[in-house]
Image: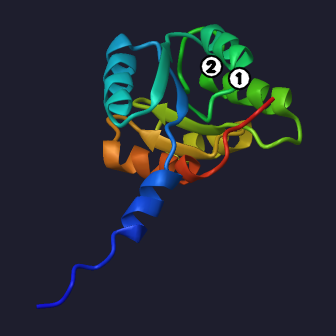
Amino acid sequence: MGALAPRANATSVAMAWRSLRLIIADDEPDTVLTLSALLDHEGHSVVGVHSAPAALREVRKEMPDALIVDISMPGPSGYQVAREIRELRGERRGPLLIAISGRWTGQTDRMLSELAGFDHFIAKPCSLAGLLRLLQPLTTQPRLTE
């Protein structure tokens, strides 16, 4: 009977992982509540807001690692949030921006989200596994700083 394999790989992977600071901005309270609970359960720090101005206020308080933003919020849209964050960050690396929508899910909407500055687009209802795949690379990178 052979000896058990050393657990160094599992340990080093676990030590490299870090929790993320996330903002979820959606005018649908159920979406914010559900995504917040799921991502919190995964070990991340989540702030949920219900408007574009609230999302931008949170970004200015402390730069998050990523934002998940509904593109069709009333008032300033998610597109405006993405544009303002990209302007705020300038040439510096900014937070990962994920557009989410249950209504505007066509190819044109996806292209508009990219032009506004979003890195990814997901349709509602979204898969938690798919969302975690988008966030996973951030868990092994250094935290964003101002």
- Amino acid on which disc 1 is placed: Gln
Secondary structure found at label 2: loop
- Relative to 139, say whether 117 is above or below: above
Percent position (x, y) of residue 125?
A: 32, 35
Q: Quadrant of residue 114?
A: top right
Question: Which image quarter is the C terminus in?
Answer: top right
State how the image is colored.
rainbow
Residue 4's disc is none
At horizontal 42% and vertical 54% (from top left) the residue drawn is: 14
Please, which residue is most extreme toward the bottom here? Answer: 1
Q: Nearer the viewer, residue 107 or 46?
A: 46
Percent position (x, y) of residue 8?
A: 41, 69
How packed mark 2 is, by other alpha carbons closer than 10 Å (few <14, some 14-19, many 20 or more), is some
At horizontal 61% and vertical 24% (from top left) the residue drawn is: 78
Q: What residue is shown with label 1? A: 80
At horizontal 79% and vertical 33% (from top left) the residue drawn is: 86
Residue 60 visible: yes
- Amino acid on which disc 2 is placed: Ser
Q: What residue is shown with label 2? A: 77
Please, which residue is most extreme toward the right here? Answer: 91
How packed mark 1 is, by other alpha carbons closer than 10 Å (few <14, some 14-19, many 20 or more), is some
- Relative to 108, say whether 52 is above or below: above
Secondary structure found at label 1: helix
